[in-house]
Image: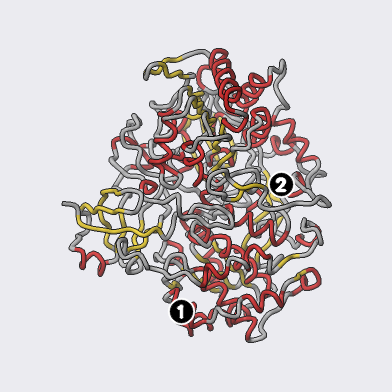
Amino acid sequence: MTTHIHKRTCNICEAMCGLIITHETDKVLSIKGDPDDPLSEGFLCPKAVALQDFRTDPDRITRPRLKENGQWRDIGWEEAFEIAATRLRAVQAAHGADAVGVYLGNPNAHKFGNLMTIPPLVRALGTTNRYSSATADQIPHHVASIHMMGHPMLIPIPDIDRTDMIVIIGANPVISNGSLMTAPGYGKRLDGLRMRGGRAVVIDPRRTETAERAGEHHFIRPETDAFLMIALIREILATGAEDLGHLAPIIVGLEALRVAVEPFTAEMAAERTGIPAPVIRDLARDFAAAKRAVCYARMGASTQSFGSLCQWASNVLNLITGNFDTIGGAMFTTPAVDYVAMTSRKGRTRSYPEKRSRVSGLPLYNGEFPVSVMAEEMETPGAGQIRALVAIAGNPVLTAPNGRRIGKALEKLDFMVAIDIHHNATTEHADLILPGTVALEEPVYDMVFHSFAVRNTAGYAHGIFPPPHGNPTESEILRRLTAALTGANELGPDPEALLAHFLATGPHGGTVSVERLLETPGCVDLGPLTPNVAERLETPDERIHLAPRAFLDDLPRLLAFAPGSDAAHPFVMIGRRQTRSHNSWTQNSPRLVKGRNRCTVQIHPDDAMKLGIADETAVVVSSRTGQLTLNAEITDAMAPGVVSIPQGWGQSGTGLSVAGALGTVSINDLTDDARVDPISGNAAFNGVPVALRAAG
């Protein structure tokens, strides 16, 4: 049998590692890192090797399935599309267009075909009830960019390979290889920083793998990151160390900022955060004095009650020290497919938030309501109540806050159709499942994460293997479902044709095309990040705004915050990310879950001793929304009073032979959908008050 070599980008997570896949006609022989990839330079994490497992998963759904009287049966594609369109339209005819909701899972962000075909589907449905995983972790970044620079995708990226100092707040990029910062092989990049005499400082309630690699770490109480960052801003302004650099002519709001941050002294921040005031002052001085520095705040800083304030403050810290849009600071990509230009609204009036949710009044940004309100929008009667759902590659029962509530609400829907590869905690509530496709069966161009990479690259490759049974790819499923809903005789534009158009009209249109990318195995190097934000601003006055009213108005809420005030739940819970798992759908790969149980609750030794909890013994963790039992992992990597449970687990009882046999639990049976960042609506997964006791 002939052996083939195929180069492509891994699109499981944001890292975009370059792959060399050796395969036969229907079998993968090996998956290795591509040393010639200009971004990953041969780095590879275990998840990429598991790409072959997702394709051959024995539990994978490979034919459309319809549930009748509680039993599943396989049906044909034409029948499936007819049922989906007929029943969705019936719900809308009875209850209005918004009676159908749409939920988009994380894998869609890595599938350019889905990104191009989901908007026509949503327009065909005519619903405003749209939700996605973005409001579970990253919408504060977009909101900060909207109010400060006028566009949700103008998100700055740390220029890690050229900086002299990086302050990492609530992020673990050695494990994630970047999040809204595509930087594969991040540990090696940190090593490079230190070898050239630079400094990395990690602020986190847990001494993470990144903290170990960086060498400098400070524990911080969960949900107090904004106190620290605003105190750093105040200290820099109070000592006259600010420097707006080359952006000074287009930055507005400095004096309003100076007044707003005045109450946030180093002493106040020390009291709230647990980081001593002299450490805060020294950090402010060193950051301002560094030739090239950057602050990077991510998951822990976003998925909390003050997520938007954190992302605003991170941007401000970089701006007032001249480290914004400068080499070694917080920079912006010039991707071959430029989302900012594609969705530009220069010269048009905008208002934010665009709308508010029907029940809780939480904000809608970028056409999406926060996932934290999805359950109440299904439960609460009245005009606009969600009575049917289209779920695309998503599992909110495991990945959204208070997941059990979502599961109960899904069970009461009139109709649900899911595009997925598994019977999981969410799709078990569906009436119809359309089988999805996996990475090795699909073309790959990572539209979103080329926009967040620490180096400009572009790569496109066709799928290696055909989908099972000649099934359509997910993008074709979406196009056919749209046609069924609209009654069109033809499908919408082909995603590859759209990609060709966007490449031709993008910043590198003269050199990058679909044809060239297909002729060049792997990725094309488009060079390092360069200053460019001035010409890309979308604010009405084309200025960068340091002190938008949305953030200043939220400062009194922050000042009133008292950490650790829940006597019934005296501990604070945070999540954690792991190398061999990604969200909720990778745990059915035997090679990714082998070895010791990694779904544990990490507890500081002093807390464990007080509670009589021993290592590897069962612990009951309870919150306002529920309780879980899982094994303890005693470690001084945790700050006292803080516990950590990883996300993405809990598939027991779903029928997945590997994941279901692990006996793990879902952290989102404890997270609380009533805890949100009110500016953005982002779920506050971190900082959840919990109680602990030894089981039994």
Q: Residue at x 33, y 67 (%)?
A: 641
Image marks 2 and 1: residues in contact by CB distance under 8 Å = no
Can you tell which mark lies on residue 270? 1
Q: How busy is the neighbourhood of tag 2: few (under 14 within 10 Å), some, or many (20 plus)?
A: some
- The number of callouts visible is 2
Name above or below for residue 589 compared with residue 82.
Answer: below
Residue 31 visible within the image = yes
Residue 556 at x, y percent in the picture:
55, 70
Can you tell which mark lies on residue 137? none
Q: Which residue is drawn at 58% across and 15% down?
A: 82
Can you tell which mark lies on residue 339? 2
In the displayed orientation, state which residue is furthest to the left.
696
Left or right relative to 591: residue 283: right
Element under disc 2: helix
Q: Quadrant of residue 443 in the image?
A: top right
Residue 129 at x, y percent in the picture:
59, 37
